[in-house]
Amino acid sequence: MRRARGGDDGALGRGTDGDGEGTGRRGRRDGRRETPGRARLPLRRSLLGRLLAVSALVAACSVAATAWIAVQTTSGAIKQEQGQNLTADARIYDTLLDYAARNPTWDGVGATVRELARESGRRVALTTQGRQPLADSATAATAPALPPQASAVVDPLSVDTVLAARGTDGQGTAADRIDPRAVGPFRLSATDSKTLRRTADAKVECLNRAGIASDVVVGASGRPRVQIVGNDPERALGTRCDLAALDTPIRSEQKALDALTELADACLKRQGREGVQLNSDLSWGDPASSTVPGEPGPLVPRVPAPAPVPVPVPTPRDAPAEDSAPSVVTPERTGENDRAIASCVSAARSEQLSSYVASPALLFIGDEGGATLPGFDLSPANTARIAGAAALVLALTVGASVFAGARLVRPLHALTGAAQRMRDGEQPESVPVSGDDEVGRLAAAFNDMSAHRARLEEQRKAMVSDVAHELRTPLSNIRGWLEAAQDGLADPDPAFVSSLLEEAVLLQHIIDDLQDLAAADAGVLRLHPGPVEIRELLSQVAAAHQARAENAGVTLAVTATAPGPALRADPVRLRQAVGNLVSNAVRHTPEGGRVTLRAYVSDESDGAVLVEVADTGSGIPSEDLPHVFDRFWRAEKSRSRRTGGSGLGLAIVRKLVEAHGGTVDATSVEGKGSTFVLRLPGTTPSGP
């Protein structure tokens, strides 16, 4: 039967207050205060923006200083180190290339590798192209693994022209990939070399007597040659010093040259081209001065070679008669033929020399730890500069951090102290608001919280007093009647029992209201939703309060269309909420006034059902309107039963409507009346 009551004394709290909690789903009527001027701060004014700016500035300075110091102190050292390393690498490469050009195998190269490693302070290792070790200067018991990529390939038949140029002071050209020291069968025996050397010495003496400075230079093949100072061989033509004897190939050289010519001719014939006669300097076509392959160019003109043998050539039928004479067969001097001949000569040289030189090998140059590029040590001056700059940057960083941190921590200390004093039970106090940034907003929020906590504490004390007062009155009445009956001063007749029952019902009513609020606060308020005919529900509430309205001289009317809006709710709880509103309206409407109950569908697209209870009573002052749904709060402080009850009725209305997913709002004009509107989610009526 507790749920059936609608607007009895427990619902008289038209100006009640309670725990002051706001739900954000009501407007200014339910005690939720909006804080003005709290839009999102622009980043440039916020604390976060300032901290980011300081951090970015410090980081930029640090990066700039570090980059500048690194460039200034390391670029020169890196360039110097790289230059030294490249020169050393080229020398190592050239030495091993010379060994490969003079030896058919790599046997015995270990001593050379170790000597190169000792002179350069680097690790030098040679492997086959299949990465089988040939020689390694590493002294550790277990040598570090070689890098995946070799520093160079040592192959006298395919020279790295960049390293070779640095290692041989510019000797050799990019067009000739065969190392000039790879002479193979053109190498002279010691006897032939000595014989030619005596002849060369005699020619030099002759030239010196003629006033022409000259020297004897011995090439890679062991053949001496006369080098005229100033490199002008034409000066020797006017002397009696015949240098042709030094330029004539000996038998072993002519044999090697003939073999090379045969290899080149075979290559040309495979391409369908005519063979050539190679000169001693590996040129073709017109006879040229003699040089041994691999040696520098000729210094004096040589005796012309015999002319090519005339061979009859068939004459085309339509050719002139004078062209039918025999002619010499020589390759046509065109760019295409010359390129083909040069390619075949190069291939022939590689084929001829392959058995006289060592096979290609992979060269690895690195430090003893296995790295391919050695590091370098900074000088004490550079180290001091780096340390000084780092200390300066650190000092700037610490200073900026301390400055920013002090400004940030100062208001936080004030907040912490105020919070601790509140914890210790002291009177809440405000903290100064220094600005409109994040910390300033935090201080403002703390001040609001402190004021709200003070109000809650006052409301708690008032609530305890109000609950004690509300419970004391019916209990005192019950105790007084019972003591009177015990003393024989009152007879337990039906009127006596009815009076006790009325006081007990009032006591039960207060306890039920408190229990409903506690259940709603805990989120365990049980609802039994179902289809509700809102017009019928309003008629039931009006009928329940009709007698009280008539006694007060108030007209109670229901205006709703039939059928009313579709609604799904707990009918008992909804009658309780509407009944509390009607009870308040009847109580605060003077004789001759009117209370109207109305239900209709919202004009908005959500299809909400609005239940409106309007009266023509005394109204609510504007300053009290935001607190009407709070517990135990009301403008009338006397707590008179004539003007109010327990002060929980409207707080229960708010909780019941929120449990249905709706909101409650109130508007009032003092002296003209008030209107309470329940906004409940509606449903679409189903068809028959």
Image (tube, rainbow, N blue to C red):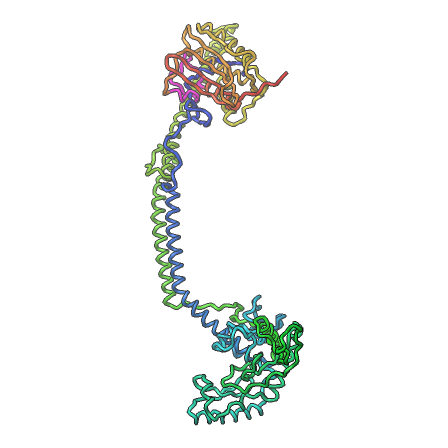
Image quadrant containing the N terminus: top right
Image point 62% across, 80% down: which residue?
Answer: 327
Quadrant of the rendering where the C terminus is positioned: top right
* Magenta segment, prevailing SS (helix, strand or loop): loop
The answer to whether residue 419 of the structure is visible from this angle is: no
Q: Quadrant of residue 631?
A: top left
Q: Observer-nearest residue: 204 or 285?
A: 285
**Number of on-image labels:** 0
Q: Residue furthest front?
A: 321
Q: In this orientation, which residue lies closer to the viewer: 58 or 585? A: 58
Q: In front: 506, or 655?
A: 655
**What segment carries the magenta color?**
624-647
Question: Magenta segment: does it hold 632?
Answer: yes
**Residue 164 locus on image (x, y percent):** 51, 75
Up-down relation of residue 664 to residue 413 (above or below): above
Residue 164 visible here: yes
Q: Is residue 319 above or below residue 513?
A: below
Residue 18 location (% of width, % of height): 43, 23
Identify the residue at horizontal 43%, vertical 84% (top origin).
Answer: 230
Q: As rendered, which of 546 and 28 lies closer to the eye?
A: 28
Magenta residue check for 680: no
Report x, y in % for residue 104: 62, 80
Q: Give the percent coordinates (x, y) of residue 246.
A: 53, 89
Q: Residue at x 38, y 12 (%)?
A: 672
